[in-house]
Image (spheres, coloured by chain):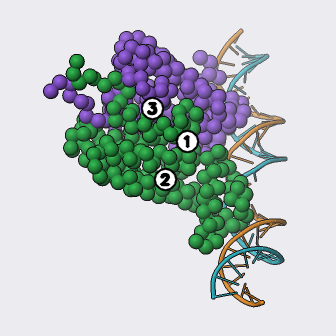
Chain colours: A green, B purple, C orange, D cyan
DNA sequence: TCCAAACGGAACATGTGTGGTCCACTATAC
DNA sequence: GTATAGTGGACCACACATGTTCCGTTTGGA
């Protein structure tokens, strides 16, 4: 890994740190944090928008990798979702900046790629509905979003200090899979 | 309701419309949309920040009112949550701008007020855990956030056209209360 | 060691939003 | 009708981020 790659990496990392705290931070701030001149930043990312895009795509890659490495296509669906949750939740801190970036919500192609990254999860859920382990009176799209939303909520809530991030996977899975109501006893 | 109140109202409404589409829109755009001069806008909201705050507080009031009008303190908890969901979900379109406003996430006092607005819900959930209708192995704070998060997710997902907003209350309640897994049969 | 690529600093042009002032116009209330 | 609060247009000054160019300096590989 040559110097250019390292510089690029520090810029992306610095951008995550700086923009998480203040999404309207100036590019000089990012450059300074990366220990790099603003000129260099512009050499790698000519415009602010391109920097953001690179940032989002980097995050997208990491999520996609995490999901793939959890092998959501294997074994019982609930176990598979547990594995995905366990691997994705810890990514939280490096992804929380996504919230505050309007580009993330307005750029249609980025939204599409986000759903593409979740595609393996969608397939697992479909599989679960087919084999009877997941209820099938809920649209798959909704279940995917509800699941992803629960993870986002966990990140936020942990960020606010209302829960600990290490508890998050359990909370997410219990809530999403079994719900918040008392389960009906199966035999009195 | 005198002229000042009406002007203020149109400014807030216009701000919601304009800032929903583009959170970095200029104040002149807001003024124009409100059918008002930029000078007048500045008379009512001296700075951009104050306009945003007023906007958020306005939204906060509406959510608080909606929750209160659903009487979450009455009757079985699950029914109460159903009523809250039914009243809050339709507010979605007029609140979706909250996402894109960084101030919403960074201003500590606004975050606090958001949780205050959810306090009646928190109490209902506590009540549910006490009377055994809700499982008590989940922290109340988490349950509140998970529930609120599910509503936010529903707004987003409806916005993306992945579900219909009129289906949202049922989806939110089913998912949050019972979970996505097939319920265990209670007697074979 | 030497050379080319990478870097950083400075200076510049630019655009744009913002906040503020002034004054003439207009409805509304009395 | 008249006084008064409310309005809006024009203008200005300021700050600040952005993007670009140029050139001297450093670094790392051949």
Picture coordinates of residue A163, whole percent (x, y):
53, 33
Q: Which mark is residue B146?
A: 3
Mark 2, other Cα within 10 Å: few <14 / some 14–19 / many ≥20: few
Which of the pair C6/D14 is nearer the observer? C6
Q: Of callouts 3 and 1, which one flags the residue occurring earlier in the amino acid sequence?
A: 1
Q: Tell me, yes or no, whether dots 1 and 2 are on the same chain.
A: no
Residue behind mark 2: A107
Q: Chain of mark 2?
A: A
Most foreground residue, A22 or A182: A182
Say few, some or many: other residues with alpha carbon within 10 Å of mark 1 (under 14 / 14 to 19 / 20 or more).
many
The secondary element bearing badge 3 is classed as helix
Asked which secondary structure carries label 2, the reply is: loop
- Determine which of the numbered discs, if any, sits on residue A103 in the image: none
B156 versus A2 height, above or below: above
Q: Report x, y in % for residue A14.
A: 64, 55
- Asked if one can make out residue A153 in the rendered structure from this viewpoint, the answer is no
Q: Position of residue A187 (x, y in %)?
A: 21, 22
Q: Which residue is mark 1?
A: B100
Q: Residue at x 60, y 45 (%)?
A: B25
Relative side of B112 to B147, left or right:
right
Which numbered disc, 3 or 1, marks the residue closer to the eye? Answer: 3
Residue at 38% across / 34% down in the picture?
Answer: A174
Q: Chain of mark 1?
A: B
Residues under labels 3 and 2: Cα distance?
27 Å
Disc 3 to disc 1, C-alpha distance: 20 Å
Residue A42 in percent (x, y) is at 66, 65
> Can see residue A15?
yes
> Which quadrant: the C terminus of chain A?
top left
Q: Identify the secondary structure beneath mark 1.
A: helix
**Which quadrant of the rendered structure holds the N terminus of chain A?**
bottom right
Q: Is residue B31 above or below residue A29?
A: above
């Amino acid at each position: 890994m040559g110097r250019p790659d390292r510089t690029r990496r520090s810029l992306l990392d610095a951008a995550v740190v700086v923009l998480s705290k203040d999404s309207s931070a100036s590019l000089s701030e990012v450059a300074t944090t990366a220990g790099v001149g603003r000129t260099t930043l512009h050499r790698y990312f000519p415009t602010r928008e391109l920097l953001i895009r690179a940032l989002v795509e980097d995050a997208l890659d990491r999520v996609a990798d995490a999901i793939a490495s959890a092998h959501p296509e294997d074994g019982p669906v609930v176990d598979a979702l547990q594995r995905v949750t366990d691997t994705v939740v810890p990514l939280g801190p490096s992804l929380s900046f996504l919230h505050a970036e309007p580009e993330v919500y307005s750029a249609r192609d980025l939204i599409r790629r986000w759903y593409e990254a979740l595609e393996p999860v969608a397939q697992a859920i479909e599989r679960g509905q087919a084999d009877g382990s997941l209820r099938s009176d809920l649209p798959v799209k909704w279940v995917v979003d509800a699941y992803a939303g629960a993870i986002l909520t966990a990140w936020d809530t942990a960020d606010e200090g209302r829960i600990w991030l290490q508890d998050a996977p359990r909370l997410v899975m219990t809530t999403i899979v079994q719900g918040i109501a008392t389960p009906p006893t199966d035999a009195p």
